[in-house]
Amino acid sequence: MTSQRKPGGDAGFTLIEALVALALTGLLLSALATLTAQWLPNWNRGFDRIQNNEQIAIAMQRIAADLSAAEYVSPSREQKKPLFNGSALAVTFVRTAFGPNADIGLDIVRIGETTDHGHLVTIRTHAPFAPFPPDAPPPEQIHTKDPVVLLRAPLRLSFAYAGADHIYRNDWHDQNVLPKTVMLTLREATSDRVLSVSTVTPVHVDAAAGKAGNASSNDAKERGQDDNKNSGKEESEAPNAPRQGGS
C-alpha cells in the first residue's frame, strides 16, 4: 500500500534535503573564510605601509620646513657666529617661533635622536631664544622642551651639511655662515638600506645684522649723494631753461 500526498497538503523539504542544504552552506562559508584569512593580512599590511609612508612624508616635510627657516642669529653680542650646531644625528639652530601657541620671537630648535623605552626615536624640541650670558653652555647642551616624535625605530635620520663649495660633511660647528644646503638621509636601521634622500636649502643671510645694517646705511649715504648730485645738476641747468611769461 503506497502513501500519496493529498492535493491540498503543504509542500516542504525533507530532513535529507535540509541536511544537504546545510552542508553546502557550510562548505561555502568555509571557502569564503579561507579566502578572507589569506586576503585580510595582505590588506592590513598594505594599509599599514601606506599609513607609515604618509607619516614619514609628513615628518620629512616638517624637518625640511624647520631647516629652511633657519636664520642667522648670534648667541650673544660677543659672539658674531650664528647659532647653528650640526652633527650626523642631530642639529640645533634658530628659527622664527612657529605653532598655535607660539609667541612672537625666535625659537631654538633641536632635531635629533634620543631613546624612548629602549628604542631610538627622532624628536623635535624647542626653547625660546634669548641672548646667551658669557658662561652659557655650548649649543648641544641647551635645555629644550616639548618633545614631538617625528620618526620611530627602525627608521634613522642622518644629516649632512654643505657650504658654498657644495661638498657635504657630517658636521657643521663654529662656522661663520650657515650651511647652504642640508641633506636628509633616511635609513632602515636593521638593514642600513637608504629609504629616502632629500636636500633642503635653508633661507638665511650670509652676514650678521650689524654688517647688514652698515651696508644699508652705506647704501643710503650713496643714494643721498646721488640725489645731491642730481639736484645740483638740475639747478645748474635751470638758468638756461626758457622762462614763462614776461618779456
Image: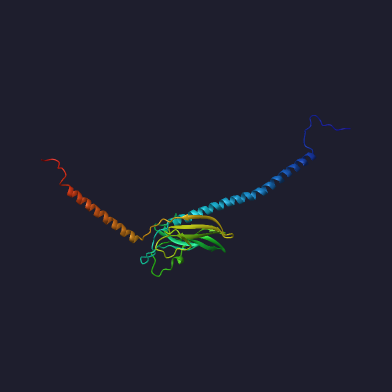
Q: Give the colour scheme of this rendering.
A: rainbow
> Vertical placement of 155 versus 247: above or below?
below
Residue 134 coordinates in the image, percent (x, y)? 38, 69
Residue 110 coordinates in the image, percent (x, y)? 46, 61
Residue lying at 57% horizontally and 50% vertically, measured from the top left: 50
Image quarter of the C terminus: top left
Residue 78 coordinates in the image, percent (x, y)? 36, 67
Between residues 157 and 123, which one lies in front from this camera angle? 157
Locate residue 25 relative to residue 99 in the image: left or right: right
Between residues 172 and 36, which one lies in front from this camera angle? 172
Q: Residue furthest bottom?
A: 135
Image quarter of the N terminus: top right
Locate residue 50 relative to residue 81 in the image: left or right: right
Query: In which quadrant of the rendered view does residue 65 lie?
Result: bottom left
Q: Residue furthest left?
A: 247
Please give the count of numbered marks on the rendered protein.
0
Residue 38 coordinates in the image, percent (x, y)? 67, 49
Residue lying at 67% horizontally and 47% vertically, measured from the top left: 36
> Vertical placement of 210 versus 28: above or below?
below
Q: Residue furthest right?
A: 1
Between residues 94 and 23, which one lies in front from this camera angle? 94
